[in-house]
Image (cartoon, rainbow, N blue to C red):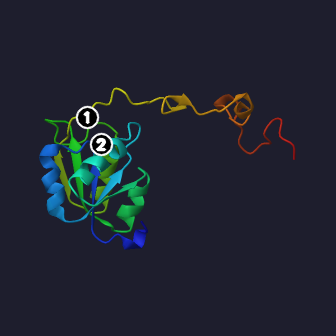
């Protein structure tokens, strides 16, 4: 979907609850669904739930929401937070969405999050879906480890 085609959108962050799905339907707007790393709740839970209720939705990366706010594509933000919490806790993606909403004067609606089992998801940054993303031994030579990083110098072993 091209950015210029988005006219009337709402952002969701967190695990959408079945109890509050009607709130999103009542908005009569395109729902922007960030991936929400590291668990990718947006992809695994939110998009299928919205689809099952015939609510138009589109996926975006977590970093894309800043551009959507800047270009005034988002008219309202829905934050699904832990029950009993009236605000996002700590520095989380929900805090980021809340901060962007405040900066861009977008109203925020905070609702209780839904239930979703996150225990089976891969949170290891060195793997992808539980598999090492370095294909073979030859690929390992292209990984720059922090102890070998240099700034403003020639990379050891490279030929100019």
Q: Position of residue 112 (x, y in %)?
A: 16, 41
Location of residue 9 by image quarter: bottom left
Residue 116 numbered tag: 1
At mark 1, the secondary structure is: loop
Residue at horizontal 24 percent and vertical 56 percent from the top = 77
Q: Position of residue 145 (x, y in %)?
A: 66, 31
Residue at horizontal 21 percent and vertical 35 percent from the top = 115
Location of residue 66 by image quarter: bottom left
* Disc 2 from disc 1: Cα separation: 8 Å
Residue at horizontal 32 percent and vertical 31 percent from the top = 118
Q: Where 70 sits versus 20, above or below?
A: below
Q: Where 147 sits versus 7, above or below?
A: above
At mark 2, the secondary structure is: helix
> Residue 131 or 29: which is nearer the viewer?
131
Label 1 packing within 10 angstroms: few (<14), some (14-19), many (20+) = few
Label 2 packing within 10 angstroms: few (<14), some (14-19), many (20+) = some
Q: Position of residue 46 (x, y in %)?
A: 29, 47
């Amino acid at each position: 979907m091209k950015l210029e085609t988005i006219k009337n959108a709402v952002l969701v962050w967190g695990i959408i609850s079945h109890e509050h799905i009607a709130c999103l339907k009542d908005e009569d707007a395109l729902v922007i669904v960030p991936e929400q790393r590291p668990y990718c709740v947006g992809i695994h839970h939110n998009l299928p739930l919205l689809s099952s209720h015939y609510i138009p939705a589109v996926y975006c990366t977590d970093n894309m929401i800043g551009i959507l706010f800047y270009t005034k594509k988002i008219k309202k933000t829905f934050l699904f937070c832990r029950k009993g919490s009236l605000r996002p806790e700590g520095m989380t993606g929900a805090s980021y969405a809340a901060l962007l909403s405040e900066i861009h004067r977008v109203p925020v609606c905070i609702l209780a999050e839904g239930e979703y089992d996150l225990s089976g998801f891969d949170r290891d940054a060195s793997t992808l879906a539980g598999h090492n993303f370095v294909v073979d031994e030859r690929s390992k030579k292209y990984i720059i480890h922090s102890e070998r990083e240099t700034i403003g110098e020639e990379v050891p072993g490279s030929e100019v």
